[in-house]
Amino acid sequence: MVQPAVHCFLPPPPGAPHIPFTKHFHLHVPGVQPSSSNPAPSSLVPRTVSTQGQDSRGLIPLGDLMCLLLTLPKTHHFCPPQLSLDPLGPEWDCPLGSKDLEEEEGPWGGGSGLPPPGFFPGSWSHEVGLDCKGSPEGAEARAWTVYYYSLLQSCLQQAGLPETQDRSQVPRTATLLPLPTGNMLLCLSPAWLTKVPAPGQPGEAALLVSKAVSFHPGGLTFLDDFVPPRRATYFLAGLGLGPGPGREAAELARDLTCPTGASAELARLLEDRLLTRRLLAQQGDVAVPATLAFTYKPPALLRGGDASPGLRLVELNGKEGQETLVKEEVGAFLHSEALGDALQVAVKLSGWRWRGRQALRLYPRTELDPVVDTVLALLEKLEEEESVLVEAVCPPARLPFPGSPPPGPELALRICAVVCRTQGDRPLLSKVVCGVGRGDRPLRHQNSLPRTLEVALAQCGLGEASQVTDVRRRVKAAAEAALAAVLALEAGLSAEQRGGRQARTDFLGVDFVLTVAGRALTPVALELNGGLCLEACGALEGLWAAPRPGLVAEEAAAAPLVETMLRRSARYLMEGKQLLLLGAGGVSKKFVWEAARDYGLKLHLVESDPNHFASQLVQTFIHFDVTEHQRDEENARLLAELVRARGLQLDGCFSYWDDCLVLTALLCQELGLPCSPPAAMRLAKQKSRTQLHLLCRHGPPWPAPSLYAVPCCPLESEADVDKAVRQVPLPGVMKLEFGAGAVGVRLVEDAPQCHEHFSRIARDLQGEADHPGIGLGWGNAMLLMEFIEGTEHDVDLVLFGGRLLAAFVSDNGPTRLPGFTETAACMPTGLAPEQEAQLVQAAFRCCLGCGLLDGVFNVELKLTGAGPRLIEINPRMGGFYLRDWILELYGVDLLLAAAMVACGLRPALPAHPRARGHLVGVMCLVSQHLQVLSSTTSRETLQALHDQGLLRLNLLEEALVPGEYEEPYCSVACAGPSPAEARLRLLGLCQGLGIDGPHYPIAYFLSHFK
């Protein structure tokens, strides 16, 4: 039996593009805070590390963790050049060789292929078991394994962390794994991994990990053997060309069943300067140097297509007899306006073989013959699909110093940007790092000290905040456009061209030079790389390895990459899972079926409506009346029998529909599937029981749940109303015990109003048929609770085994009293961090106080002058727009998280997620907007604006049916980089669409968000 693997990392082969490990991933485990004696490992391991998919018993189910294959840093010999920063002389930067890379000497000379005789300061044990049983290594491979282990120990010591403990003599098994445990592994040798054919997936293989370095809370690392081997659920490898570890890593990454963040095939594309130059030139947001390319039998991706601005491709069918053509083309290029103010050109080779060889020569733009001679000489060395490039050397921007410039040589600047693929394949700039050095010497990634963009520009003479902000904005736009271009290219490739069905580029480094174009400082993209820019960012982050007073830690450059790894791993884990879903919901839950198809979930639906549209979208449809809640225990037994009779092999069972929550818990109990206890679900489902139960929970621990509960009294008859009025301070709030969507909720100020509202509800809302979907199947009992002054907020939680994995706080606008139908919302919260933390803790402790330990829950609270107060707990995923907004802003899918918890898998979520922007929205009500929703602001109009990206629409009801007890028809929201900008956009949109009006004042509803 094969046990699942955690994220793994493998060192790079000689000459490989590296994806740095030791300088970019920072261990951060919820509940473990860095201290002076135990600092955060700022130069070591992933910042967002959480166990992926442990079941409720603390064992690791098959195929639950993910594997990454990352690399350790290399020498500067293989860094790409920054053309504008290279020496202005005719000498070769690196001599050309006639050998094919199959015969290339070792990167540090001597041709032995052995690691460099590096010296790693520090002291650690060398008596460790680096051999992998069953996979012996040769002397050369063993030398590299020892080298990387020593490098790892040196990095650990420099970060103030303990050395790795060798546990390989006692192999890890499922029953020996601690809870929680790290879910990322570093593999120091390809021999520690094995590919095995994947059953039922011809041509693909699963990746197994037999030995690795594992990472744990507190910065602890262990050298572990795994018996049986663990299965990887994500893989990221350092890749190489020649024989040895590089080729082994490339082969390991090819055609895997699990997601991979790199492949030799994709790296080949990124390392082709001509291909990427053309790709970027076709992007309107990316400036590139003017380039003339002579390409010999170009690859299919370079043939034909639209002409690119500033890029001239000359296709050659032969390498000899091209003197006349070359001279004409070079002459025309050197005199073309495309070169702008460039005084020099560089001649270089392009192609996978030449990566790391960096042969280039610089010439004045006026010297035609030497350029032509060099091009002709290089043509002789080309093989098919390779090119010779003649490109403009972008003149570095001359930044004026305030006052007199500092003494010494002029400084040059290189900008490195790391951009990551996030939710929905959207690029996100992670970090920008710069290198500053003498303008008369080469400036490379690893021979200059990294610094922030602000510091680097100030050192070069640009300190004005607005100009620095503008440069950062331009770098962000260009870097994100570069990754967008790469992702678009990959989307058109076959699985074979990508190196596997699951192969993708998850992050990208972009090198820029800062020049002047059109009187504006413009970043010009020189090259794309797979890890050098990320390494530069990590080196800068390493400056803060030891905490200092007053220092606010920034998010690691690799944090979005780690989130993408975790997200892709989760999708892989859940693909093909069999889930029983109770209750389909209405139009507001249509996203469920689209998401299930996207994730590869196999849904089996239990639903009361035999004609529900979702019956055609699931694997199995079971028509069953789930609204008779007095028979929930009996119905759970009947459903369990139906499941067994149909032979359904379920991995989990869950619900997001209020009517089905208790029945779901009972059914899970019958089937032995993970879920919060039925008693906890009942407690949370009945609002008065929730409050009264928590009022009695005085702790320990402290603060106790009783601090958040609100006095209330259940109402089942008119006599109960008189009793409640004497017990609960007025004004108060009357609501249905099992209600949803704020239907029937009303502010009451005295006893007559209480009696009047109770009689009205008793008359109008007697059963499910009177208003389906709001819990009337439980009856129409009510409660009276104290009215709490303060701002209203939603907290959406993900809990697993009683541990808080993630929390998302949103703000609600003022309601239209005496009703409580939601009017407006804002996410993320505009509260101060301490107030936000108070709300999260209140929600978490109230859930635990009710016994809710596993699931996705929505908790409604008010923030008063005395702290948070509980309105109610919804023991299911938040409704309305919440799942959509959280997915958009944080990249976290609550639906997927709920499905994973239902399968006993712990979702790996960022402990402190950072929003990618702001959303502000308002609700549209049929009672207030029937006219505009039926004409100028129709559903079709709103959908068209949504498709254009002008607003975000969440449709909540199917039809425009007015009624006294209404729920919102839809939510309309606008996004912005700040709450103020999003609010202004929304206000203008609502005024233009007619949603704003005297009886529905949008400005007032948004006033809480200032």
Image (cartoon, rainbow, N blue to C red):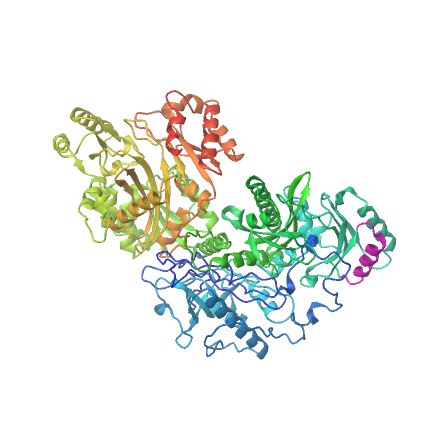
Q: Nearer the viewer, residue 840 or 735?
A: 840
The boundaries of the magenta stretch are: 365-382
Residue 1010, horizontal then vertical, whole percent: 40, 33
Residue 683, magenta (yes or no)? no
Residue 356 quadrant:
bottom right
Residue 868, horizontal then vertical, whole percent: 28, 41
Residue 174 quadrant:
bottom left
Q: Is residue 638 visible?
A: no
Residue 370, magenta (yes or no)? yes
Residue 532, horizontal then vertical, whole percent: 59, 58
Residue 60 against residue 725 in the figure, above or below? below
Residue found at x 62% / y 64%: 76
Q: Is residue 218 visible?
A: yes
Residue 873, horizontal then vertical, whole percent: 28, 42
Give the position of the N terminus as an image quadrant.
bottom left
Q: Nearer the viewer, residue 517 or 993?
A: 517
Left/right placement of residue 115 relative to residue 608 reads: right
Which secondary structure is most common in the magenta stretch?
helix
Q: Nearer the viewer, residue 123 or 334?
A: 123
